[in-house]
Amino acid sequence: MKDLNCESTQYDLLTIAQILCGKSSGIVCFLDTDSDSCFYDGSEIERNTLPLGYILGGEGSGAAIGKTFISNLLKKRYSKQVYKNFMNYYNTSPQKIIQNIYKQDFPDSYLSQFAKFIAKNIEETKIYNLVFKSFSDFINENVKQYDYLNYPVYFTGSIACLFEDILRDACLTNGIWPTEITSH
């Protein structure tokens, strides 16, 4: 069996479920550039909430978090220091950001790359609340579609790892007790 790698953006949900659950049933959640979830019955995926990407869904994903962060940043909803630090760190401008989102391939990957900057600035209340809300939305739109009170719930992926503490807080606030949030 393969090892889970939190930096991976390529995934096979069945393989992830097999690694996390083994031969037991469970709810498996993947939070990376995109997000996905399923109910695994111990041998195959029995149910899957359709991942709709960051435009129609993608709650809890790097792309969805990045999209909301960039929208708020460009509307100057964060401190001047966060705005300045972001523009300097990425050597960018609002025009370059908009061009990269609307004119380049893979805007989801472009938006997801900002997760590390977001993590470095998580002490800003508005940024923390953005990530917490995205995870709460994921839980309500995905995890709660399954029998989460009677089966273990597992999380993996680069975003789950990067924001593990906030994900755990969102889970507990929403009545979910995560069995595991992979950290390797």
Image (cartoon, grey):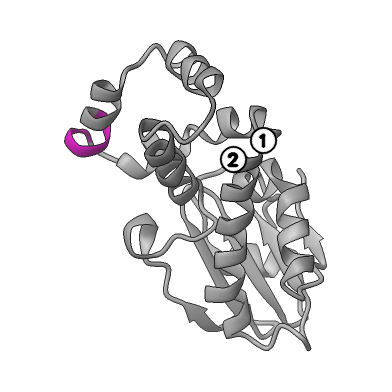
Side of 11 relative to 17 (left or right): left
- What residue is rendered at 56% in x and 66% in y? 138
User: From the viewer's perspective, is residue 145 above or below residue 110?
Assistant: below
Secondary element under disc 1, as helix, strand or loop, is loop
- What residue is rendered at 38% in x and 56% in y? 54
**Disc 1 + disc 2, Cβ < 8 Å:** yes
Q: Residue furthest left?
A: 103
Question: What's the residue type where badge 2 is placed?
Answer: Ile
Find out whether residue 102 is within the magenta segment. Answer: yes
Question: What's the residue type where badge 1 is placed?
Answer: Ile
Give the spatial CA distance, label 1 vs label 2.
6 Å
x and y, in percent, of residue 114 in the image: 49, 32
In the rendered structure, which segment of residues is drawn in magenta?
100-104
Does any portion of residue 27 appear in the rendered image? yes
Q: Quadrant of the C terminus?
A: top right
Find disc 1 in the rendering and name its residue. 122
Find disc 2 in the rendering and name its residue. 127
